[in-house]
Image (cartoon, grey):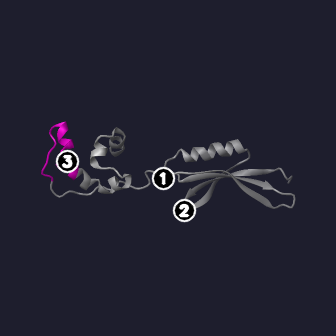
Amino acid sequence: MASNQGNFDIQVFKNNRWATEAIREREIDARTMAKKFLSDKKCAGARVLANRVKHDGSVEEKVIFEETQSVKGSQLLKIATVEQIKIYCEKPRDFFSLESRIIFNRIFRSYLESITLTPTEVLHNHKEIQRLAD
């Protein structure tokens, strides 16, 4: 092999280690694929390694692209059970009452702790309400 030949490994960070997902001949293709992996919110990171074969046959690896991100949506939403509910929401304003927010907090405690929001903040944030609905 000539000294300028090589390829590009696309690695993804999962299970606390880097694993090769694909190999491409062109750098632009490798970078595009790494960015595609990063578009998945469950992907913790992606990087591209340039592999160059030297004259003596050894391979030189160099990281040319690396990006990490916090993983979202990897944990299932756990909903706690409530034995008795003494409140019924009949009007929209009932959803914002103190009793409703207490019950909301009790049911969605693990989720609220993971996103560090209060029931009031969730009720006033369309994006969070949509996330719960999904």
Q: Mark 2 belongs to which amino acid?
A: Asn
Q: Are marks 3 and 2 in contact (CB under 8 Å)?
A: no
- Which numbered dot is residue 13? none
Q: Is residue 12 left or right of residue 105?
A: right
- Left or right of 25: which side holds 66? left
Say few, some or many: other residues with alpha carbon within 10 Å of mark 2 (under 14 / 14 to 19 / 20 or more).
few
Specify whether residue 34 is painted magenta: no
Question: Residue 27 vs residue 132: left or right?
Answer: right
Residue under pointer 3: 100
Quickly name the residue at label 1: 71
Q: Which residues are magenta?
A: 85-102
Residue carrying label 2: 16
Where in the figure is residue 61, as x and y percent of width and height? 73, 57
- Which x, y percent locates residue 84? 15, 56
Q: Earlier in the sequence, mark 3 or mark 1?
A: 1
Give the residue type that dot 3 points to. Answer: Ser
Residue lying at 21% horizontally and 42% vertically, measured from the top left: 96
